[in-house]
Amino acid sequence: MNSPSRLSAQTKRSVLVVVLTAASGSLDAVGFLRLGGVFTSVMTANMVLLGVSAGTRDAALAAHAGAAFGGYFLGSFLGSRVSGRAEDDQPVWPRRVSLTLSVEFAVLTAFAAWWEATGGHPPGGQTYGLLTVNAIALGMQSAAVLRFGVPGLSATYLTGTLTQFVASLSRGRVLTQSLASLVAVVSGGAVGAVLAVEAPRFMPIVPLGVVALVLVGSQLAFGSEETTSRT
């Protein structure tokens, strides 16, 4: 009797996580284009860049990659403390996920205020601080999605998502959620890049709007949701 309800809840969750992925794309775009040429959710790439900076003796690259890595580490740590860990028979959308995303929204608001204070053109020294705050937000976002306890579900690191999608194609199937996540991160990156270059003062609207949309959507979909399921 409850299966259709659970399936519906899981579908709603998947849609919200896909939407959240667009925020990652937009923030990674601004990190790459305007904050030192590094990423704020793709830590594997930043660790490689740390190695590259050591090999090329590029102190500026090392500092930017280090700032992004440190911010993401801190955000993931704090986000994990707020969101907690996955539990058996937890709600499809635990309340602490929304709490973590609310804290992320507050961090992004601080980022937006700082960005606005620079007129969308942060001077060199301030890029490190903005990069750190940017990465803190995405670290918290990663921790929030991890709380669901669903293998392969992510709104930041998507190499595994791409691998799952390609593997499904090799078996003659199409993983709709994986494809949607990949499209969302590319779309978020494209919009973030256009704003970062053409209208930099408006760039924070994208991640703030996405996270706000997910918070409102989760409240509408799960505010009174009693269904519990991890899968």
Image (cartoon, helix red, strand yellow):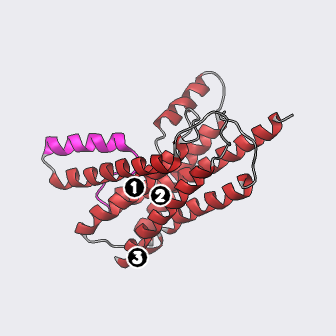
Q: Secondary structure at mark 1?
A: helix
Eye-nearest disc, 1 or 2: 1
Residue 176 visible to an observer of this rendering:
yes
Q: Image height check: is 57 above or below 195?
A: above
Q: Main secondary structure of the magenta part?
A: helix
Q: Residues within 10 Å of mark 2 (few under 14, many from 20)?
A: many
Residues rendered magenta in the picture: 35-56
What whole-number distance in Å separates the C-alpha atoms at marks 3 and 2?
Answer: 16 Å
**Outermost residue toward the left?**
57
**Outermost residue toward the top?**
171
Asked whether residue 40 is drawn in magenta, I would say yes
Along the horizontal axis of the image, is 225 left or right of 109?
Answer: right
- Amino acid of disc 3: Glu
Q: Image height check: is 200 above or below 53?
A: below
Q: Residues within 10 Å of mark 3 (few under 14, many from 20)?
A: some
Is the N terminus in the top left, top right, bottom left or bottom right quadrant?
top right
Question: Where does residue 227 sit, x and y in percent of width and height?
Answer: 75, 42
**Residue underneath mark 3:** 116
Taking depth in this image into account, of 173 and 214 the one nearest to the observer is: 214
Q: Residues within 10 Å of mark 1 (few under 14, many from 20)?
A: many
Is the C terminus in the top left, top right, bottom left or bottom right quadrant?
top right
**Residue underneath mark 2:** 26
- Name which quarter of the figure residue 180 lies in: top right
- Amino acid of disc 1: Ile
Question: Where does residue 22 sit, x and y in percent of width and height?
Answer: 54, 54
Q: Residue at x 33, y 58 (%)?
A: 132
Q: Residue at x 42, y 66 (%)?
A: 196
Q: Residue at x 37, y 50 (%)?
A: 72
**Residue underneath mark 1:** 136
Question: Where does residue 70 sit, x and y in percent of width and height?
Answer: 30, 50
Asked whether residue 224 is drawn in magenta, I would say no
Along the horizontal axis of the image, is 17 left or right of 202?
Answer: right
